[in-house]
Image (spheres, rainbow, N blue to C red):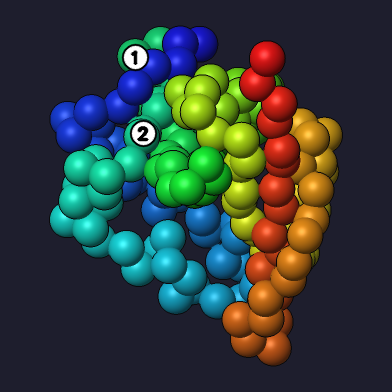
């Protein structure tokens, strides 16, 4: 597996990956109108101007991706996604670790996931992220925001 910066040429493949990866999340919450599933390819393309995108590639296929942006010392990590048939092989861990490396000036990393997304919560907490607030979206979905502070030496 190779992790490298993604480019606009990768946008369509990342879009397809996102559509596939978020089906499980949507099913957990019985909500197929979650932002990652209603985001358009044009909206995703526009984000390449303001965000860092990474991709994980195996055998020429993009199997995972993550994006992030930094504001005031905090790196906001978004859309950590892996194809369902490639999960539990360390791809998500490697992507998250590399997005942190890609933002060396950040003193804090922040991300969120749904309260019923047990695998996501387990992964984030294993990598040092700790819950710091929750936000109710609707009756079946509460977002859990997690953060990780880093000390640069």
Numbered disc in front, either 1 or 2: 2
Q: CA distance from mark 1 to mark 2?
A: 17 Å
Q: Residue at x 32, y 63 (%)?
A: 39
Query: In this image, 153 relative to 52: left or right?
Result: right
Is 117 drawn above or below residue 135 in the view shown? above
Is 108 drawn above or below residue 26 in the view shown? above
Query: In this image, 146 relative to 81: left or right?
Result: right
Residue 140, horizontal then vertical, whole percent: 70, 82
The reply to whether residue 104 is visible in this rendering is yes
- Other residues around mark 1 within 10 Å, as few (<14) / some (14–19) / many (≥20): few
- Other residues around mark 2 within 10 Å, as few (<14) / some (14–19) / many (≥20): many
Quarter where residue 114 is shown: bottom right
Q: Residue at x 61, y 67 (%)?
A: 27
Residue 103, horizontal then vertical, whole percent: 48, 28
Q: Nearer the viewer, residue 66 or 148?
A: 148
Residue that carries the numbered disc 1 in the rendered image: 60
Quarter where residue 137 is shown: bottom right
Q: Nearer the viewer, residue 69 or 46?
A: 69
Q: Nearer the viewer, residue 2 or 88?
A: 2
Is 31 drawn above or below residue 15 in the view shown? below
Q: Residue at x 40, y 28 (%)?
A: 54
Q: Secondary structure at mark 2?
A: strand
Tell me the tag on residue 53: 2
Is 41 drawn above or below residue 60 in the view shown? below
Q: Nearer the viewer, residue 117 or 137?
A: 137
Q: Residue at x 41, y 43 (%)?
A: 69
Residue 7, horizontal then vertical, whole percent: 23, 28
């Amino acid at each position: 597996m190779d992790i490298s910066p993604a480019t606009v040429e990768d946008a369509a493949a990342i879009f397809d990956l996102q559509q596939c990866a978020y089906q499980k999340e949507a099913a957990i919450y019985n909500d197929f109108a979650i932002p990652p599933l209603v985001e358009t390819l044009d909206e995703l393309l526009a984000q390449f101007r303001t965000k860092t995108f990474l991709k994980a590639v195996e055998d020429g296929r993009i199997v995972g991706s993550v994006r992030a942006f930094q504001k005031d010392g905090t790196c906001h990590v978004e859309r950590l996604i892996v194809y369902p048939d490639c999960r539990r092989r360390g791809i998500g861990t490697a992507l998250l670790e590399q997005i942190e490396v890609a933002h060396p000036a950040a003193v804090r990393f922040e991300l969120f996931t749904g309260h019923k997304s047990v695998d996501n919560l387990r992964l984030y907490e294993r990598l040092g992220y700790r819950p710091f607030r929750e936000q109710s979206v609707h009756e079946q979905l509460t977002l859990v925001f997690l953060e990780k502070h880093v000390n640069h030496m």
